[in-house]
Image (spheres, grey):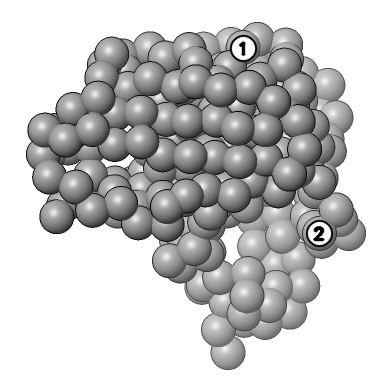
Amino acid sequence: QVQLVQSGAEVKKPGASVKVSCKASGYTFTGYYMHWVRQAPGQGLEWMGWINPNSGGTNYEQNFQGRVTMTRDMSITTAYMELSRLRSDDTAVYYCARVGSPWLVDGPFDYWGQGTLVTVSS
Amino acid sequence: EIVLTQSPGTLSLSPGERATLSCRASQSVSSSYLAWYQQKPGQAPRLLIYGASSRATGIPDSFSGSGSGTDFTLTISRLEPEDFAVYYCQQYGSSPRTFGPGTKVDIK
């Protein structure tokens, strides 16, 4: 069965960086685009960007350009999202989410990780 | 950027009642690339509907989606206790992908 298992909660100081991992299993990792979405406490969902696990190609939402880096390690079927120069308003739960159709960059997100809470506080 | 507006913000209903949720887009959503998700407290979102009207795997037929262009609707024909949650619409036809602010369905 498809599973996306994310790394544990993080507490960071303003200005630091955080790297969240998303371990995929139960399907062909390189065949499905992975997106990242975040949710601030009590707020809605905010799309951050995607990575093509096959090629490593990425596309980031403009608001995160220059601060976010999405990578993957095919050998361990894991995707990563690193956010730098953290601010207090980056406090949120970060989710990885798989596009439901193979080889398509766009599509509904059929599987989600359990979420990783990143708290930014001095 | 396509802005999605959901209404109402909160829907207070009793089990067994029908729920009708609206999602309106600021411009036409291409190819009806519109999805609905359900989210319960402390959980990740769960895909319910994609392509505006297709149910995801394992979703009961009490959930249905309709609409095209800029106006979309999620209908829950008969609310079960487990259906009380927050519902988000999302468009995935153009970048950036955007979500609506959500509709909370709570128990009256």
Q: Residues within 10 Å of mark 2 (few under 14, many from 20)?
A: few
Q: Secondary structure at mark 2?
A: helix
Name the residue rendered at 71%, 54% in the picture: A82
Q: Position of residue B96 (x, y in %)?
A: 78, 42
Q: Report, in whole angstroms, how far the alpha carbon at label 1 lies from the one at label 2.
A: 26 Å
Q: Position of residue B30 (x, y in %)?
A: 76, 22
Mark 1 on the same chain as mark 2: yes
Identify the disc placed on residue B52.
none
Disc on the earlier residue, 1 or 2: 2
Name the residue rendered at 42%, 52% in the picture: B8
Q: Quadrant of residue B37?
A: top left
Name the residue rendered at 16%, 52% in the picture: B107
Q: Quadrant of residue A78?
A: top right
> Circle 2 is placed at which residue position?
A63
Relative to B54, is B96 above or below? below
Identified by mark 2, the residue type is Asn
Name the residue rendered at 81%, 46% in the picture: B1
Mark 2 — on which chain does it sit?
A
Relative to A77, is A88 above or below? below
Q: Quadrant of the N terminus of chain A?
A: top left
B91 or A100, which lies in front?
A: B91
Q: Residues within 10 Å of mark 1 (few under 14, many from 20)?
A: some
Q: Position of residue B27 (x, y in %)?
A: 77, 38
Relative to A34, is A70 above or below? below
A106 or B53, which lies in front?
A: B53
Extreme residue toward the right, this view: A66
Can you see residue B81?
yes
